[in-house]
Image (cartoon, rainbow, N blue to C red):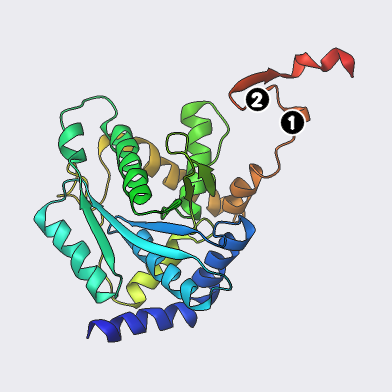
Amino acid sequence: MCVSKASEVEKSLRKKFKKSIWSRFTKAINTYELVKPGDKIAVCISGGKDSMLMAKCFQELKLHNKFDFEVKFLVMDPGYSPANRRMIEENSRLLDVPVTVFESDIFESVYNIEKSPCYLCARMRRGYLYSHAKELGCNKIALGHHYDDVIETILMGMLYGAQIQTMMPKLHSTNFEGMELIRPLYLVREDDIKAWRDYNGLEFLQCACRFTENCASCDNEESRSKRLEIKQLIKNLKQVNPFVEGNIFKSVENVNIDTVVAYKQNGVRHHFLEGYDRQ
């Protein structure tokens, strides 16, 4: 039964969701050079819809790859409830994804921290993933952030952080030499991921966080006041301008430095007055 369900899911990626998911996944791989010959990639699975889809896409990519690379499917248990841990393991078996599970005590470590526990938790989780992936001989970790995460991050930076920045398709690790982070779902829309999930009758973790695991989604005070507000703002703007999402995404590809008052590069701040009188 598990094999047949996995086969159905794989077929849906090749057929029904070829244009909306598979083609955008491979476009990101090629456009941003996310996978190269000799790579050994730790595909990080949190148990949610995004990372599970990413795992299935990588399995499909391995069937068609034009050069040699390896993948490891990595699950970190930061202190999940038994029910959440069981759900991740059952979905992995159902979808025929051979996961490697390791444990940490991150949830316990940040549980009593009052200021920005979500930010600290995310930082710690990424560090653990880098560390374990490196132990497995991997040179990259793959995370399941998608197109909507990117445009929301751009707006959140402007409206709440007073800065223009984006969620990059890939990054060199600053703490783990020789390691990179890649985001293969960079061009895939969240609505299409939900459509894939629902079409295949799949159920994934909504939120496994210790703070919100009894809720339907991650809408604790910190994320609700920002991420969900930005989602609603984009939804409202789209009613007036149907191209608004694409425009937000493209805005950070079309930055004109000549019209920017100040910017940072390699940690150094530059101001337009530096060369103004020499023009």
**Could you say where residue 196 lies in the image, as x and y percent from the top left?**
39, 72
Point 33% across, 49% down: residue: 135
Q: Nearer the viewer, residue 230 or 60?
A: 60
Which amino acid type is marked by label 1? Ile
Point 29% across, 74% down: residue: 95
Position of residue 169 in the picture relative to residue 218 (left or right): right
Specify few, some or many for label 2: CA neighbours under 10 Å numbering under 14, 14-19, or 20 or more.
some
Question: Is residue 141 among what the camera can see?
Answer: yes
Q: Would you name the residue on which mark 2 appears?
A: 263
**Could you say where residue 49 lies in the image, as x and y percent from the top left?**
33, 62
Specify few, some or many for label 1: CA neighbours under 10 Å numbering under 14, 14-19, or 20 or more.
few
Above or below, 22 against 103 in this view is below
Position of residue 209 in the picture relative to residue 250 (left or right): left
Query: SS for tag 1?
Result: helix
Disc 2 or 1, which lies upstream in sequence?
Answer: 1
Which amino acid type is marked by label 2? Tyr
Point 48% across, 78% down: residue: 63
Question: Is residue 224 among what the camera can see?
Answer: no
Above or below, 74 against 196 in this view is above
